[in-house]
Image (cartoon, rainbow, N blue to C red):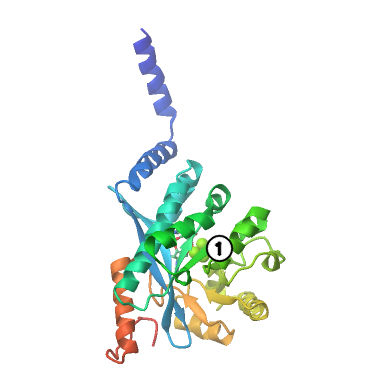
Amino acid sequence: QSKADGGNTFHLFSSKMDHHVKETIALENELRNAIEQDQLELFYQPQINLENNEIVGAEALLRWNRPDYGVVAPNVFLGTAEEVGLILPIGEWVIFAACKQAKKWMDMGLDTPRIAINISPTQFRKQDVPQLLKDALVSCSLPPEKLEIEITENIVLHGSEATVRDLRVIREMGIAVSIDDFGTGYSSLAYLSRYSVDCLKIDRCFTRDMMTDPNSTVIIKAIVGLGASLDLSIIAEGVETREQVDYLKDAGCELAQGYLFGKPVPAQEFSLLLEQQSLKAQGQYPQKVLVGAE
Ligand code: C2E
Ligand code: MG
Ligand code: MG
Ligand code: MG
């Protein structure tokens, strides 16, 4: 009898479960195995110096090769990963994978740019991020100048004294610190003096609206001015057109990242970009290295 009841209960519950809940559970279960089954991968997107079109950095962006789904973008699964606590092992995996890859490029003799990794606020709150970074650098024999972390304004706005200390330690180790999606958060700039950072990444929405909304240009110019005064570098995210490059240069912005110069690509493909750049530097390869860089 209890068996029959159980069956009924399950049936009722099952019919009530909406598609979304089922999908979230499936996602969670599969995500749990993603690391062990080697399904996570970092793609790399070039960061460009607009003066000479050289690659000065690479942002590591997480992808999940999910069975039956293909390549899944981080916004699809990082929310769930946060909710169920998987963001910590995933975040650790990202740190070590990026350091290993950077070291690999150095060992290949490539002029390896600094690799920027995204770190979630949760990871900052719950783990000893400075120690994790130190462990990764040591175990990969990677010089700290090759590493950069990107954090969001939220971390610095709602961060504790511990966060202030952590960021200082990270910078003292020689790792650069960037504020991602800059300009979209709570509009207090006070934290910029409280936290020591190296770089502000102008959010894509300003780059996107620059041509149609004069206010976006004003904001970009203001951020560039802020950078000059506070001795921070400024990089524009989401650059897709040459026209945007002209506007950015006009606004005094010297660094850029976006589809115009290259989409995020697997490590092996990024190696080719670095190889081409090395050859070009040696005067052996006069062709243009990047599509957007003329
Ligand atoms: P983000 O750190 O602001 O990264 C930039 C996002 O903009 C990336 O999306 C990138 O592919 C996209 N993008 C770059 N250039 C262009 C462009 O010209 N046009 C357009 N439309 N988009 C462009 P992606 O890779 O889907 O990553 C989304 C977000 O997921 C990232 O935003 C970041 O917040 C988060 N994320 C990615 N990888 C990681 C990771 O390893 N750890 C953590 N905690 N978060 C990550
Ligand atoms: Mg980022
Ligand atoms: Mg961003
Ligand atoms: Mg973003």
- Vertical position of residue 125 compared to residue 214: above or below: above
Residue drawn at 45 percent across, 53 percent down: 91
Residue drawn at 65 percent across, 59 percent down: 164
Query: What residue occupies the far top of the structure in this picture?
Result: 1
Q: Residue 176, position in %: x, y? A: 53, 69
Residue drawn at 29 percent across, 85 percent down: 279
Which corner quadrant holds the N terminus? top left
Residue drawn at 39 percent across, 59 percent down: 139
| Image side of residue 277 versus residue 135, left or right | left
| Image side of residue 141 versus residue 153, left or right | left
- Say whether residue 179 is visible: no
Q: Residues within 10 Å of mark 1 (few under 14, many from 20)?
A: many
Which corner quadrant holds the C terminus? bottom left
Q: Residue 157, position in %: x, y? A: 66, 58
Question: Disc 1 beta carbon < 8 A from ligand 1?
Answer: no
- Say whether residue 22 is visible: yes
- Vertical position of residue 281 compared to residue 82: above or below: below
Residue identifier under label 1: 170
Residue type pointed to by label 1:
Ile
| Image side of residue 70 versus residue 235, left or right | left
